[in-house]
Amino acid sequence: MTKKLSIGKSFATIALGGTLLLTMTGCNKQVLDFNKSFNVVVEPNGDSISVVGIQNYCDYEGSQVQFETVDGLRVLSSTHQAQMVNVASQENLNRYVTALQDFDDVVMYYDDQILFGKAFNKKIIDLDYVFNKAIIVRDEQATIYNITAWKDYEDDKMQIKLEDGTCMYSEIDNIKIVNDANAPEGAIERYAATLVGSEENVKHYGAVTK
């Protein structure tokens, strides 16, 4: 009798599983996330839209994401601003950016090095914790800071220490930290310019004194 009851339960479980499978047949939600490839970071900011081709990325706790450009600039940013995008062609990228663009928005490309057809570029293990600069964007102004230390927190807060000893603690949304040691000269200025629409709106901390 017990054996029959067990068999009955097994059939009931199979039947329920089959029903759920049939119910989900018309559903397009992915149960497993198998897309681990993104080749562009798009970031709308005020009247400008930044477009940056990347070669790899790594996601952190909370809303943080680290990405590296094709020429070696490494950025830790927030997904509240930076959109990770996977596009198959320049035509698709143009279509996507145009859909975000308002009439007066300036679209600025970091460079033309976009790796279309990139497959699985997520870094499973991240050992790159060295960042030497930070960018803070306020309205249409981007300021670049040299930093000596940084710390992130689970609640999306970040603390950075500047070269002159000044410490700053704020939301990750307000700060990008960058490593430009392996990037070409002027790379961080070029990236900062895409965030604010013009190189004229980029300055270095301490460069202007009263």
Image (cartoon, grey):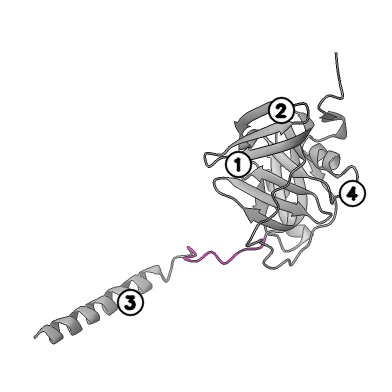
- Residue 4 in picture, x, y percent from top left: 14, 86
Figure check: 88 above or below 136: below
Return the mark for residue 138.
2
Left/right of residue 1 with respect to residue 57 in the rendered view:
left
Kind of residue sitting beneath label 4: Pro
Q: Residue at x 46, y 65 (%)?
A: 31
Q: Badge 2: few (under 14), some or many (20 or more) residues near its Cα, within 10 Å? A: few
Kind of residue sitting beneath label 1: His
Mark 4 to mark 3 CA distance (whole Å)? 57 Å
Mark 1 to mark 2 CA distance (whole Å)? 15 Å
Mark 2 to mark 3 CA distance (whole Å)? 54 Å
Figure check: 199 above or below 75: above
Return the mark for residue 80.
1
Query: 203 or 47: which is nearer to us?
Result: 203
Figure check: 20 above or below 112: below
31 falls in the magenta region: yes
Query: 119 or 163: which is nearer to us?
Result: 163
- Residue 184 in picture, x, y percent from top left: 89, 49
Residue on which the image places disc 4? 184
Kind of residue sitting beneath label 3: Gly
Q: Badge 1: few (under 14), some or many (20 or more) residues near its Cα, within 10 Å? A: few
Q: Tell me the SS state at disc 2.
A: strand
